[in-house]
Amino acid sequence: MAIPAETFFLDPEFAGTLQQQIQRMVSEGIISGRFRPGDKLPSSRRLASHLGVSRITVTLAYSELMSSDYLASRGRSGYYVSETAPRHASFGLPLDPKRDLVDWARAIGQRYSGQIMPEKPADWRSYPYPFIYGQADDKIFDHSNWRLCALQALGKKDFGTVTADFFEQDDPELVKHIALHTLPRRGILARPDEILITLGAQNALWLCAQVLLNQRRTAAMENPGYPGLRVVLNLARCSLLSIDVDREGMRFEKLPPNVDVVFTTPSHHCPTNTTMPLERRRQLLNLASERDFIIVEDDYEFEMSFLNAPAPALKSLDRDGRVIYVGSFSKSLFPGLRLGYIVGAEAFIGEARALRAAILRHPPGHIQRTAANFLSLGHYDTLVGRMAKVFRRRHSVMMDAIQRHGLTIAGSNTSGGSSLWMKTTPEIDTRDLAFRLRSKGVLIEPGQVFFDRDSAVQTFYRIAYSSIESAKIPDGIALIADEISAMRAERNVRRSDRTP
């Protein structure tokens, strides 16, 4: 790689000579790792011109760096970072001390850190038994057709569309396909001005919260529930209520009369995988009408209903315009896509569109058009069908293994999805369980992160089958069961030691 001359700047307050300053800039770049072995330095003529110094000054600096093995010369090709360049200490010259005199505790006006979210190791693919949720299986995805759709989006015909700044607008082809094909399958009819493209469901939920809530309003969400939503609602600074769920979803009879917005995942509830029955969906809509609150429906994983037909979306049953619908392609295509959409009343979408424009204008045009091509050419439907077939098989294998090893399923799994909500006995802390399993190549998700801070629940965990092959599932489940048994045995030994 060639290092551009524009990387270097002279410091007018530097106490040494120009030659020493050039030496330090180069050596610091090598020591810090910014310049790597084999990288080519700017020519002495080019760097001298850029810095406004004599060429001999740069040449002498390079020569000194060569003598200390920071640089190497390759004939007439130029100067390169040496393959054996030192990684510490520099000519007795101290590295430029970077001082931070800002009192950030006082300077930061609003804090966004400290929120609890699930943790997934970056190298999860290296683990033999990755029972983690939300990651794509490379073997299932249609790489070749996605690549062709991306190339088509960059062709002459679409190039002006994908490179233009739409400001508040979205790719008309993607919006058209969502309106005419995706939403009708959920029983929803919507005009283009009632649809907004987002950077995934997380961005969609954030837009909903920012538009609908403030410090004087009250929101309710499920407990346990999606941690990303809890983060969004905490940042909205509203009053937040955690409503328990049972095997049919949110127990909305516990909703107080003053609630303004209810966030719910009626299809494949996160994390229990429960699907809210039709009758309860209607009861929730009636309650919303009686009490005059808004419902934000996160239609989570409806495409993965391979055990039974998906239940109608809440939005399809809505006759008052109270339901705002959130959908996403990130789980069914791949999570790195970050592409979702909101469907709601024109007045609401107008506000959400204006907020989105102020933050990011619109999602990248090339991604939108590539997704539109993939959807319109039928590749998406084929992919979803293939995923459903694979997930059905993995689900069956996992259920058999769980039953064989006596593990306990806590959630309800009547329609499909890609994960199971599990429970251990009270003496097992699933955070410890997850830590111990990791050393054996098994990844699970402790369940505490899905509950609010006041819920001291440590016995739940989630295992997903979206990223693990069927053949590996039985051995992975066996390792989970063995570790739980070992932890119980250790607990019994400690109890017996304390017994007089």
Image (spheres, helix red, strand yellow):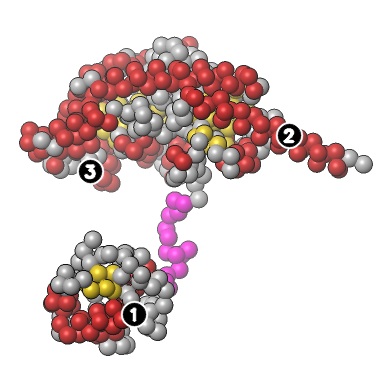
Residue 436 lies in what quarter of the image? top right
Q: Is residue 80 visible?
A: yes
Disc number for residue 361: 3
Question: Residue at point 31% right, 15% down?
Answer: 185
Disc number for residue 312: none
Q: Given contact means CB atoms under 8 Å apart, are the residues at marks 1 and 3 in contact? A: no
Q: Amino acid at mark 1?
A: Ser
Q: Is residue 268 visible?
A: no
Q: Crowding near pointer 3: few (<14 within 10 Å), some, many (20+)?
A: some
Q: Which residue is mark 2?
A: 488
Q: Nearer the viewer, residue 364 or 75?
A: 75
- Foreground: disc 1 or disc 2: 1
- Foreground: disc 1 or disc 3: 1
Question: Residue at point 37% right, 68% down?
Answer: 32
Q: Amino acid at mark 2?
A: Arg
Say which label, 1 or 2, has the lower sequence index.
Answer: 1
Magenta range = 98-113
Say which label, 1 or 3, has the lower sequence index.
Answer: 1
Distance between the alpha carbons at the discs numbered 1 and 3: 50 Å
Residue 241 is inside the magenta segment: no
